[in-house]
Amino acid sequence: MIKLTQPQAVEIVAEVRKAIIGKDSVICKVLMAILAGGHILLEDNPGVGKTTLALAFSRAMSLSYNRVQFTPEVMPADVVGFSVYNRAAGHFEYRPGAAFCNLFLADEINRTSAKTQSALLEAMEEGQVTVDGVTRPLPPSFTVIATQNPYGSVGTQPLPESQLDRFMLRLSIGYPTLEQEVKILKQTEGPRPLDSVRPVTTLEEVLRMREAVGQVYVADELYQYVAKLCAATRDNNLLRLGASPRAGEVLIRVSRACAWLAGRDFVIPEDVQELFLEVLGHRVALSPQARATETDARQVLEDVLRAVSAPRLVQS
């Protein structure tokens, strides 16, 4: 796990930890994605704190927040907005949807229809929505944190590959240890931990942190390293779908955030390796051969990471 040295990042993580116990690695990686301008998919069982995590970040970072509980009845207009006729004024007026915020929580996104899921595509990729032929920009620092239950849960359906590719990271919170669960249970005796989370940054400071992340230096050797990693997934007979160039671009962006949070103005191979599985895990698909041998995507990607030699950077 990366050791945080940026004072503001340390404060943000400390506040989120009040609501989420024992999941520091997940908290840090969510923060990396937010600062890298990416979106996060939390895939896990119900009740492990996915929604609480999103709420804690919105409060700690002073981000305006909307939540949609996705069900089969949720329509695209609920997300992107719609036009309604104003009889008094004699014209149509636009009513913004839930996506008009800094942090949008798409809760149980895989329980809704593919049509509604796809309504998020333009918003996530372009930071804007188009309704009735008019394009409207979303607020700055727009970030989607989507949660989904594992496939096979009642009423769920897989996200389309085009939607999955829009998420920078796919993370899993996981169940707590016995000691952590005891602490969680004891929290029920007093005020909700989420109520104690206080804002420690402003939106303007978040935008400045994003700008600083974008200025982190990446050496040519690291660009080649990321390209080789992606190419190795496309040449692997255990994968029918390898990583696209977009996956490499995303890996570079979030590696910059990882380096910045560690107090460096340059990326090192360990930053790439720290995030490789979370960036590529949902962007590759297993071949029939892999499924027949009960090999999962994580095992294949770990083998790729070991097989591709990392560069040795010489600091001038």
Image: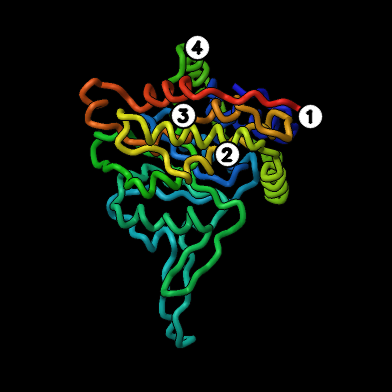
Which residue has dot 1 on it?
Answer: 316
Dot 1 amino acid type: Ser
- Indicate whether 67 appears above or below 248: below
User: Is residue 286 or residue 120 the one in the foreground?
Assistant: 286
Q: Secondary structure at mark 2?
A: helix
Q: Residues within 10 Å of mark 2 (few under 14, many from 20)?
A: many
What residue sits right under mark 3 in the picture?
A: 277
Q: Marks 2/3: CA distance?
A: 13 Å
Residue 49 at least partly seen: no
Q: Nearer the viewer, mark 1 or mark 4?
A: 1
The local crowd at label 1, few if under 14, some if 14 to 19, many if 20 or more residues have their Cα within 10 Å, is few
Disc with the residue nearer the chain's start (3 vs 1): 3
Residue at the (49%, 65%) spot, across then down = 96
Considering only order in the chain, which callout, 4 or 3, is on the residue closer to the N terminus? 4
Label whose residue precedes the other's in the sequence (1 or 4): 4
Mark 2 or mark 4, which has the lower sequence index? 4
